[in-house]
Amino acid sequence: MPKVYKKRRSRFRLPPALRDLQFRAEYLLLRLVAGLVRAMPLSVAVAVSAKAWRWLAPVISRVRHERALANLAIAFPEKSEAERLEIALAHWENLGRVMAETMQIDRVIRDPSRIEIENLALFSRYKDKLGPAIGVSLHMGNWELAIWPLVVAGANPAAVYRSVNNPYVDRYLRAQRKDLYPGGLFGRGRVEGDHDESQRTARIITDYVRRGGRLGLVCDLHDRTGIPVPFFGKPARTQAIAAMIARRVGARIWLARCLRIGKESRFRIQIKELKVPRTSNPADDIRAIMTEMQAQFELWVREAPEQWMWSNRRWS
């Protein structure tokens, strides 16, 4: 029989001029929303945003809401459907608060009474001899603030972030984070980060830490090429870059959780050093690091499940 060739569908792309116009319109909409949020007192903006996300997100983001419920069923099979639904709705509230706080992040960090670093004495022992270090956190509370201990210690941390396709929005979001990441941002994606190396991020950040840099990462997402380690009793493929870099260049790993206290944009940041094994088997060392890291993250999530981002992909 003759071979039948299927015609490939070409993906429609807007002409560059129209694409730029779309980017500008999206950017102006973002600035309008940010302007409205910044015009309100922080407490009002956070309360309004939390309520809006609780009621609207499950409808507008139906797929992500169903994913949150499915993830909760994996993590808490012993809870009733009603209990898991309440956690899912509370997690949307938390995300609403994070959105408003991010748009007023300068006001949050300007008030030192809002951020308590629980075990600062432990961290301060290494302040003057910190050396290369990696701060690893999870999407909990307002996770952007988890890097704050490194900032307070004068460690000039940088971070890896997933850049967005819209260059105007991307520049705005990076500018909003500049006080949290004085060392700059390494971009992943199509838009270049501050270090102008988005296409070679893994190698560049390894060199950065090797030279004594301090780097912030979030490691609680599904990664199809990651290492499967237990999380709530089920293997979860997890990005291993933090463990690989620390093992390779001799960096410390600090785990951090930002825990929301009440509803008034107040936070407690908990930090814990994760010992990095260096045996004759690097692969076993990396797996051991990842296993301990995710075990600690699971413990933290169990303590305040409503503050973790259940709508993210975790197990598949």
Image (cartoon, rainbow, N blue to C red):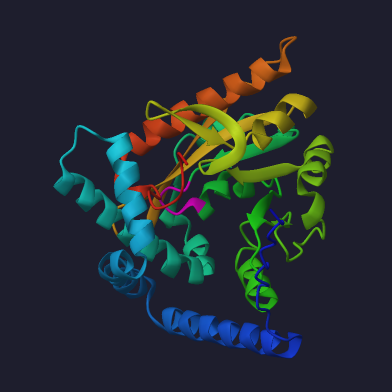
- The answer to whether residue 255 is left or right of residue 201 is left
| Residue at x 27% of width, y 65% of height | 54
Q: Can residue 104 be seen in this view?
A: no
- Looking at the rendering, the stretch of residues picked out in magenta corresponds to 139-143
The answer to whether residue 259 is left or right of residue 229 is left
Residue depicted at x 52% and y 64%: 110
- Tell me if I can see residue 6 in this picture: yes
Identify whether 158 is placed above or below 92.
above
Quadrant of the rendered structure where residue 255 is? top right
Percent from the top left, x then y, of residue 260? 36, 50
Q: Residue at x 29, y 72 (%)?
A: 52
| Picture coordinates of residue 243, whole percent (x, y) | 66, 30
Q: Is residue 122 above or below residue 46?
A: above
x, y percent for residue 156:
71, 50
Of the pair 88 and 273, the residue shown nearer to us: 88
Is residue 27 covered in magenta? no
The image quarter containing residue 226 is top right
- Mainly helix, strand or loop, the magenta region? loop
Q: Where is residue 32 in the image (x, y as percent from the top left)?
A: 50, 86
Q: Give the number of marks.
A: 0
Which of 253 and 261 lies nearest the eye of the viewer?
253
Question: Hey, which residue is sitting farthest front in the picture?
Answer: 1
Taking the magenta stretch, the answer to whether it contains residue 142 is: yes
Q: Residue furthest top?
A: 280
Q: In this view, does 109 lie to the left or right of 80?
A: right
Residue 238 image-quadrant placement: top right
